[in-house]
Image: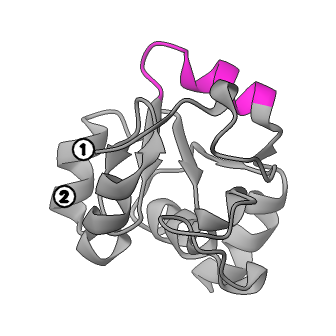
């Protein structure tokens, strides 16, 4: 049931890269990377905080997100990068981690989730890709 409700909400929460970056720069916004710790250490967007999807619990999310359940949360996944090589091997779009991450965040009571819609090259300077 949650997945059906969230699917409709998610469709309206996809951001083009420029808007995604502008939102990420706002005070109080959380840029959340839900990939594995190893993938995050191998590279991520600058300013992102890592909490692997497999580690999501009410407590772990509250510790990372903070007390405000309406805090803006931005997410991205391997499928947002065109490189298709380590550390961001592309997965089948319907199985992208963004989908499960979005559903879980909303299901845990965090409704203000936004997702990167575009596919970019992580080598582009504007992406702000960093290792570890």
Q: Relative to 23, say whether 39 is above or below.
A: below
In the rendered image, which quarter contains the C terminus?
top left
The answer to whether marks 1 and 2 mark residues whose Cβ atoms lie closer than 8 Å is: yes
In the displayed structure image, the side of residue 128 where residue 117 appears, left or right = right
Q: Nearer the viewer, residue 39 or 110?
A: 39
Residue at the location (37% across, 71% down)?
Answer: 53
Q: Which residue is mark 1?
A: 64
User: Where in the figure is residue 83, as x and y percent of width and height?
Assistant: 69, 61
Q: Residues within 10 Å of mark 1 (few under 14, many from 20)?
A: few
Q: Which residues are magenta?
A: 18-29
In the rendered image, which quarter contains the N terminus?
bottom right
User: Where in the figure is residue 108, as x and y percent of width and height?
Assistant: 39, 64
User: Where in the figure is residue 39, as x and y percent of width and height?
Assistant: 37, 64
Task: Give the number of the disc on residue 60.
Answer: 2
The answer to which image quadrant residue 37 occupies is: bottom left
**How is the model colour-coded?**
one colour
Q: Residues within 10 Å of mark 2 (few under 14, many from 20)?
A: few
Residue at the location (23% across, 69% down)?
Answer: 57
Q: Relative to 41, say whether 124 is above or below.
A: above
């Amino acid at each position: 049931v949650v997945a059906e409700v969230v699917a409709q909400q998610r469709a309206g929460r996809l951001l083009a890269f420029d808007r995604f970056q502008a939102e990420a720069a706002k005070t109080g916004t959380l840029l959340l990377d839900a990939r594995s710790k190893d993938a995050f250490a191998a590279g991520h967007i600058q300013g992102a905080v890592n909490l692997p999807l497999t580690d999501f619990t009410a407590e772990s999310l509250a510790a990372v997100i903070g007390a405000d359940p309406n805090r803006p949360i931005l997410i991205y996944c391997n499928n947002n990068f065109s490189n298709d090589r380590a550390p961001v091997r592309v997965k089948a779009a319907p199985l992208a981690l963004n989908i499960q991450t979005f559903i879980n965040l909303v299901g845990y009571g965090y409704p203000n989730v936004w997702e990167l819609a575009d596919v970019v090259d992580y080598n582009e300077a504007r992406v702000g890709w960093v290792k570890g």
